[in-house]
Image: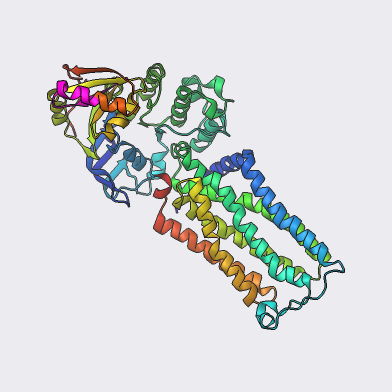
Amino acid sequence: MEFAIEFHAVSKRFPGGAVALDNATWRVETGSRVCLLGPRGAGKTTTIRILQGALRPTGGSVTLLGVSVLGPGYREARRRVGIVPQVAGMYTDLSAGEYLALAGRLYNRNPDPATRALDLHEYLHARMSELSASFQRRLALAVALVGRPEVLLLDEPTAGLEPLAASDLLVYLDRAMEDRTALLCTHSSAEATQLCRRIIPMRAGRVVDEAAWEDERRLKPRLRLSARQGPDRLLAELDNLSRHGEADGESVLVEVTDPREEAAELVGALVRAGVDVYECSPVSVPVEVAGAEAPP
Amino acid sequence: MNVRLSQVQYLFWKEVRQLTRNQVAMLTSLLMPAFLLVLAPLLALLASRTSGYGPVSVPALTARLPGFEAVRTAQDYFLYETLPLLFVLVSLLTPMLVAIPTLIVERERRSLELLLALPVLVDDIVAAKLAAILATAVATTLSMFLVDAVVILTLTPAGTAYVVGTAFLVFSTLVASVGGSLLLGLMARDVRTATMRGALFCVVPLFLTGLCIVAVPGTARFWVLGVLMLGLACGAVSTGLRLLTYERYVV
């Protein structure tokens, strides 16, 4: 069995002492679609940063397409990978076409097929910053596809998008992930189950045992919360309240001990923090992880 | 540093294109040298040829300093004491003004993510940015210096040795400032901090300039100071690569 991505006992500690990854071990089989699922601070973006060669792990080993990310063949391996970054700032002084052309030159490939695949040909002359959020993500996906990559790394590709735009993008993502290895990093279990065959749950830089995680999800009572400001704001405020939340579509699932006791208190705290909560209900049926396989 | 020239070249032109489209960056990097490097010297040198300007009396204690031994007239004073300071000041500030949109704003606006998503290494990105900063600063500063060179050669007795020496000083200071810009890019999180730290980075080169102006005689001061500037550039780049590392730039 071949693996496109392998993390073995990987740690990443930043100079200030913050630990982003803590002895993380997991791997992605070539041709499979895998999701790293976890809340903010789980280590998902650090994982992408290590795979794109921007950060060096402080411990353990990482291989991408069979090559160490610190080794001499990494640059060539990197050319076989497409990356969709987490919410990127867009250039105010470059057009979408110029950015695609730059990617084309760097990959030494014609960017037209990727442009057509993402239906961007009418927007090539638009400044990147003037594109709608949805088109900006499509542009980022198109650039990731210019080099016809064997591996696609997606870092929270739908974060911050309106529900309709997010579901539109999911169609493009699903198509882009066909016939290639894909690693999706997200906090949304709905997105994870829709796009991926296997989920690797992460928390605080550690890979959570998949079976234990499933049991925990089934046993722990949870509240489903929805707010006018969307799941990202809800998650941020829950973080401030030291509560663990997990996005599920436009809602957020929050683990609680006693839903009846805690619901009013939690909603009150969120409303005081300026979050307009319009839904709060106990979750009795667990969200299943479709097709989850055993951990490596 | 692991860079691939072909990749750096594409990124370099992208940076130059963005810089030339950035009106604020271009105006500041053109106007400041235009005033300090062309207008001020031209007016001062023209004024120094008028009858109101003649010999200067350097105080006895100051006259004993090697840097003042050739100073006899107001024109000498301007050429050997004031003008080198202007050259250094402009050559220090121009790259830093260009570095702020290229290095700091890119990170602050999170558009750096777009570059990191491309098939290049952080080394390529930083090398392209530094090359673009140097090229833009050289294009604006050295072109204006050429005006000075012509004016100095036509209006003053300072010969080719003076012009070549100051050209070396301007170029080496530009290189030092690009090295400082790398440190600035690694250390400053936003434009505000970059502006404050940028001013601090100028302290050492300006101190060395003052020291060379008073302590080194004749045109030798330009060569000594130029070599010191190149030393500062090496120190800045080496500190940036070894101690701070690019992780600071991308995190």
- Quadrant (top left/top right/bottom left/bottom right) for the N terminus of chain A: top left
**Residue at image x 42%, y 38%?**
A79
**Residue at image x 63%, y 52%?**
B137
Q: Position of residue B220 (x, y in %)?
A: 66, 74
Looking at the picture, tell me which residue is in the foreground, A55 or B83. B83
Along the horizontal axis of the image, is A28 left or right of A85?
Answer: left
- What segment is highlighted magenta in the picture? A249-266
- Residue A93 lies in quadrant: top right
**Residue at image x 52%, y 33%?**
A104
Q: Position of residue B161 (x, y in %)?
A: 73, 70
- Quadrant (top left/top right/bottom left/bottom right) for the C terminus of chain A: top left
- Residue A195 lies in quadrant: top left
Looking at the picture, tell me which residue is in the foreground, A240 or B133. A240
Q: Position of residue A161 (x, y in %)?
A: 40, 23
**Residue at image x 70%, y 80%?**
B59
Please check the rendered image and state whether residue A286 is part of the magenta-colored stretch, yes or no: no
Can residue B4 be seen here?
A: no
Number of marks in the image? 0
> Is A178 above or below relative to B21?
above
Can residue B195 be seen here?
A: yes
Along the horizontal axis of the image, is B208 left or right of B76?
Answer: left
